[in-house]
Every structure is written in C-alpha cells, then in structure tokens.
C-alpha cells in the first residue's frame, strides 16, 4: 500500500512553512514588560532557571535560543536578549524581558514600554557580537548565580481576648 499525497496538499504545506518563517523573520512592535526579581530560581519553558541578572526574554513565537535586539521606542535604548521562555500570557504584551534587561531599557519605572523587536540573524551574530554576549552572560552567572527570593512570612497577630467575668 503506497501513500499518495495530493499536489495541492504539498502546496499548502509549502505555503504554511514560508508564512511561518516570514512571521519569525519579521521585526515586531508592541509593548514589553519584565519579570520581577521574585521569580528568580523558577524554571522557564526551556528548563533553565530564571536569573534576574541575565539578559533573557519570553516570547510566544521565536524559537528557544534566538537572540533578539529589543529597542525602547521612546528612548532609543537597545538591549540584546536571548529567548528562553514562552509568554507573556497577557495578550496586550509582546515580550517579557528579564529584570536586568528592563533596567537597561528603562522599563522598570513604568512597568510597560513600547518596544521594537528585531531577531538577530547569523550575519548579525558575527564572532565578536556572539562572543561578547556569551561572555557577558557567563560573567554574570559567575558573579550572580541564580538566587531564589523567598517572601517573608507574615507574623500572626496575637488575638486579644477579653476575659469574661463570672
């Protein structure tokens, strides 16, 4: 028994592949937010632990390990981040960046900022830029291994009961 594939089915598959590749290769504009430091130590979608000092990001569509150039539209400040998580889960947001990247971009004060995202291709990631980004992350990991921020437990209030007179 042989498997017969219709020609139009191949065309649809080819079109879908080109369409998806086109979406991933496009520059995007939208709003960015950031991960708070309290999430340090939690596992990301890629299996890594979130480190607020590393320059990482969460995006819905870009493959894990993709380097992105994120530019704050208002200030023009750029930051380079690596995708290692899926999200953000709020539809109005395009990307979540780590706390360090948010500080560099100037997002921390406002919480949300309009950004322009450009995926870095192999031609952009020449030896010098790629080695710089990898050295930056390795130095950050040496200086700041991921830390888990624990919320302080609230003290229980002592109840003041009035003693009843008999």
Image (cartoon, helix red, strand yellow):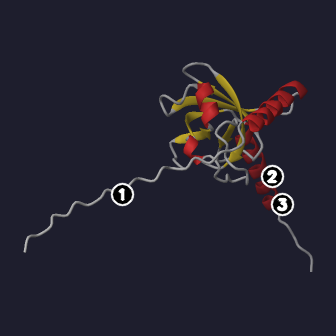
First reached walking from the N terminus: tag 1 or tag 2: 2
Is residue 65 visible from the viewing direction of this image? yes
Q: Is residue 125 left or right of residue 162?
A: right
- Which residue does the image show at 57% across and 23% down from the upper left? 73
Q: Which residue ends up furthest to the left in the rendered image?
A: 166
Q: Is residue 141 left or right of residue 96?
A: right
First reached walking from the N terminus: tag 3 or tag 1: 3
Q: Give above or below for 143 relative to 76.
A: below
- Bin the neighbour count of mark 2 within 10 Å (Cα to Cα): few under 14, some 14-19, many 20 and up: few
Number of numbered callouts drawn: 3
Measured from the top left, where is residue 9 in percent x and y? 79, 61
Q: Secondary structure at mark 2?
A: helix
Q: On the image, numbered disc 3 is attached to which residue?
A: 7
Q: On the image, numbered disc 2 is attached to which residue?
A: 14
Q: Which quarter of the image is occupied by the N terminus? A: bottom right
Q: On the image, numbered disc 1 is attached to which residue?
A: 156
In the image, which is nearer the foreground, mark 1 or mark 2?
1
User: How far is the residue under mark 3 from the one under mark 2?
Assistant: 11 Å
Q: As rendered, which of 110 and 125 lies closer to the eye?
A: 110
- Bin the neighbour count of mark 1 within 10 Å (Cα to Cα): few under 14, some 14-19, many 20 and up: few
Q: Secondary structure at mark 3?
A: helix
Q: Which quarter of the image is occupied by the C terminus? A: bottom left
């Amino acid at each position: 028994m042989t498997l017969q594939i219709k020609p139009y089915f191949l065309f649809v598959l080819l079109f879908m592949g080109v369409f998806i590749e086109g979406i991933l290769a496009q520059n995007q504009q939208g709003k960015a937010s950031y991960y708070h430091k309290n999430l340090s130590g939690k596992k990301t979608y890629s299996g890594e632990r979130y480190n607020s000092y590393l320059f990482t990001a969460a995006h819905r569509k870009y493959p894990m390990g993709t380097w992105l150039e994120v530019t704050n539209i208002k200030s023009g400040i750029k930051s380079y981040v690596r995708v290692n998580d899926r999200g953000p889960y709020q539809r109005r947001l395009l990307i979540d960046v780590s706390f360090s990247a948010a500080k560099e971009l100037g997002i921390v004060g406002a919480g949300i900022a309009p950004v322009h995202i450009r995926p870095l291709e192999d031609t952009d990631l020449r030896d010098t830029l790629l080695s710089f980004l990898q050295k930056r992350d390795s130095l950050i990991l040496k200086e700041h291994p991921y830390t888990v921020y624990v919320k302080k437990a609230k003290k229980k209030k002592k109840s003041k009961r009035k003693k009843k007179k008999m």
